[in-house]
């Protein structure tokens, strides 16, 4: 009458085997899911940092291009824009000094006579892109992606998996015509 008459002991064994294979699949997939999740979080933080730094650099170059602008006003404006997204980066002092702040700002005019720096002179920085012409001013903002602890401004989430941000930096330049 009943076609599917199986032994209850066989059903328990199948259930155990299935539970064991599910656990094995989880153990194999979890590291990949973890690395992918951490990479997405870290990339999101990097995108926020890059966008904030880009906007701060552009606004700093606009400020520097105005008549009567000072390096202090440029540094303060960059500090304000970086603080908008709650990034606790500190632009630091003028002129640049070792260990003063988390950012190095390089201000270049087209004549080549004026190159001023604000912030941490320990950060290596080479302005990217073409040199400014006589009627332009160029601002370059450089910052390390992580500190020696691997926590600031970006968390070094993937360092235990062999992908590290240590020693990497972000350099963004903007050029504006003088007014």
Image: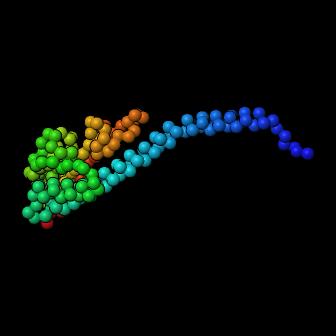
Residue 25 in the figure: left or right of residue 158: right
- Does residue 55 lie above or below 171 as drawn? below
Q: Quadrant of the C terminus?
A: bottom left
Residue sitting at 18 percent across and 50 percent down?
91
Name of the residue lying farthest toward the front:
8
The one nearer the camera, 108 or 118, is 118
Q: Quadrant of the N terminus?
A: top right
Q: Is residue 33 visible?
A: yes
Q: Position of residue 111 (x, y in %)?
A: 11, 54
Residue sitting at 29 percent across and 56 percent down?
85
Residue sitting at 73 percent across and 35 percent down?
12
The one nearer the camera, 108 or 105, is 105
The image's colouring method is: rainbow
Q: Position of residue 44 (x, y in %)?
A: 38, 50
- Does residue 135 lie above or below 34 as drawn? below
Q: Position of residue 4 (x, y in %)?
A: 84, 42
- Does residue 5 lie above or below 77 as drawn? above
Q: Position of residue 114 (x, y in %)?
A: 9, 52
Residue sitting at 62 percent across and 38 percent down?
22
């Amino acid at each position: 009458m009943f076609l599917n008459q199986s032994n209850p002991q066989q059903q328990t064994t199948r259930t155990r085997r299935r539970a064991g294979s599910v656990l094995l699949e989880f153990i194999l997939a979890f590291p990949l899911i973890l690395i992918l999740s951490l990479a997405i979080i870290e990339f999101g933080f990097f995108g926020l940092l890059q966008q904030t730094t880009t906007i701060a650099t552009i606004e700093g170059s606009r400020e520097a291009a105005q008549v009567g602008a000072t390096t202090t006003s440029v540094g303060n404006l960059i500090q304000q824009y970086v603080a908008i997204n709650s990034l606790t980066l500190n632009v630091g002092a003028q002129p640049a000094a070792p260990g003063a702040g988390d950012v190095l700002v390089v201000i270049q005019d087209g004549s080549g006579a004026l190159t001023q720096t604000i912030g941490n002179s320990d950060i290596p920085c080479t302005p990217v892109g073409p040199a400014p012409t006589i009627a332009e001013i160029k601002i370059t903002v450089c910052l390390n992606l992580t500190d020696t602890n691997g926590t600031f401004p970006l968390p070094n989430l993937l360092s235990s998996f062999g992908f590290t941000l240590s020693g990497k930096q972000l350099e963004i330049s903007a050029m504006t015509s003088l007014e």
